[in-house]
Amino acid sequence: MKKEESEERVGFNLSQENKIEIDCVIFCFEDRSLKVLLVKNENDATNGNWRLPSASLEEGETILKTAQKILKKYISEEDFFLEQLRAFGYHSSASFQENISIGYYAMVNKEKKVDDDELPSNVIWIDVHHIADLEEKYMGVIDFSIKELRKNICCSAVGFNLLPEKFTLLQVIHLYEIILGIEINKTNFRRKILQRRLVRGLAEKEEGVSNRAAEFYSLNVPKHEIFWNAKFNFNF
């Protein structure tokens, strides 16, 4: 066998060891906090390390289908926002080869996630600012997804996927302030939202609040129209 042929075959065999993993960053906005879902292996829920929900790409499965299966495992509804980020390279202790992670990020509103007291012990929602002791691989995907989320909510209304079906304008303002880490001029922001006819009033108000009850609103357009629509660019 020629040397070149031998090297080609070795290279091919090594490439077969490459692992493709799908990692999902699942965002939820609750109690004025942007949260991420972390999990542990079911058989190691007590002492194992927290990680992102993930799955290996199986033969015959598409990358998108694998990501959707991950979401459906942890979210009670099938109507969710899911967007691919990019590929990430990482090394595992089991292989000298660089493995591939395809990152996705998803947004669900708090009404569609499983209640915290009903979550199994190997699943947790945690504030993005309180994440610690996570593998560098997962932190890289999370950091990139937060940057993408910040970029996308500035040029579209995609952040509304994190809100419940009915919401107050103050909740919208808090959502943007928390994600972007800035203080927003509330009067100007309210005017922008209403001028774009992005929401409609529901003739309902908050109940059981000590201050002035705020009016509830809902989206005035289908959710699939709020992403990359220049009309809903808030120009932050």
Image (tube, helix red, strand yellow):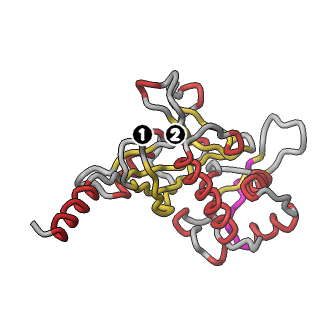
The residue furthest left is 1
Q: Give the range drawn in magenta.
A: 196-204
Q: Position of residue 217 (x, y in %)?
A: 71, 55
Q: Where is residue 52 in the image (x, y as percent from the top left)?
A: 51, 43
Asked if residue 203 can be seen in this view, the reply is no
Badge 1 element = helix
At x 28%, y 52%, the residue is 17
**Badge 2: how crowded within 10 Å, few (<14), some, or many (20+)?**
some
The kind of secondary structure the magenta stretch mainly shows is: strand
- Residue 96 is a magenta residue: no
Asked if residue 63 can be seen in this view, the reply is yes
Of the numbered discs 1 and 2, the one sitting upstream in the chain is 2
Amino acid type shown at disc 2: Arg
Q: In which quarter of the image is residue 61?
A: bottom left
Residue 34 vs residue 75: left or right?
right
Q: Where is residue 206 in the image (x, y as percent from the top left)?
A: 78, 43
Residue tagged 2:
51
At x 44%, y 31%, the residue is 41
Looking at the picture, tell me which residue is in the foreground, 199 or 108: 108
Residue 108 position (above or below residue 199): above
The residue furthest top is 46
Residue tagged 1:
73
Distance, label 1 to label 2, CA atoms, is 15 Å
Looking at the picture, tell me which residue is in the foreground, 32 or 94: 94
Amino acid type shown at disc 1: Lys
At x 43%, y 54%, the residue is 101
